[in-house]
Image: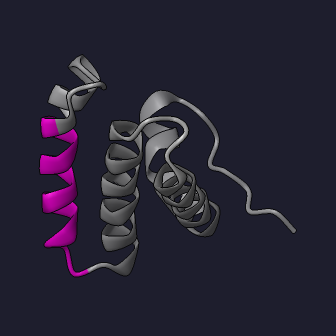
């Protein structure tokens, strides 16, 4: 996480984190691993590549399904209140 924070554009660190998440016995962590990998793959494609749109849509879907749980762990660490799920 420190490597990602130090250089968020470093895909190697992000993909290493995705590998770590994939090994967890937690569906939310595995979804986050897929989210990270999907973002990396999308960013590597030309903006007009139709596969990029598909990958970005998948990343948005994963985020919409999981953001509350993902952010719940982050908020206390940065001094924010926990996120509230939409009604």
Nearer-the-camera pick, 49 or 30: 49
Residue 27: image x %, image y %? Answer: 36, 80
Nearer-the-camera pick, 15 or 51: 51
Q: Is residue 19 magenta?
A: yes
Residue span colored magenta: 12-25
Left or right of 3 in this view: 78:
right
Quarter of the picture containing the N terminus is top left
Q: Name the residue at 39% across, 38% down.
A: 43
Asked if residue 10 is positioned above or below residue 15 in the image, the reply reads above
Left or right of 15 in this view: 30:
right
Residue 24: image x %, image y %? Answer: 19, 73
Indicate the quadrant where residue 31 lies.
bottom left
Q: Report the residue that reaches farthest toward the top.
A: 6
Q: Is residue 13 magenta?
A: yes
Color encoding of the figure: one colour
Q: Name the residue at 29% across, 25% down.
A: 9
Main secondary structure along the magenta-highlighted residues: helix
Residue 22: image x %, image y %? Answer: 20, 69
Asked if residue 79 is positioned above or below residue 36 in the image, the reply reads above
Residue 62: image x %, image y %? Answer: 53, 65
Indicate the quadrant where residue 67 lies.
bottom right
Indicate the quadrant where residue 68 lies.
bottom right
Quarter of the picture containing the C terminus is bottom right
Q: Name the residue at 41% across, 58% down.
A: 35
Q: Name the residue at 74% across, 62% down.
A: 85
Q: How many numbered badges does the structure rendering display?
A: 0
Left or right of 31 in this view: 85:
right
């Amino acid at each position: 996480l420190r490597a990602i924070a130090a250089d968020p554009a470093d895909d190697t660190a992000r993909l290493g984190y995705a590998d770590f998440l994939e090994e967890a016995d937690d569906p939310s962590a595995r979804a986050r691993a897929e989210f990270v990998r999907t973002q990396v793959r999308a960013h590597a494609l030309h903006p007009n590549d139709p596969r990029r749109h598909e990958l970005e849509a998948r990343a948005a879907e994963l985020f919409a399904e999981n953001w509350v749980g993902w952010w719940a762990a982050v908020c206390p660490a940065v001094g924010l209140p926990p996120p509230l799920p939409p009604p």
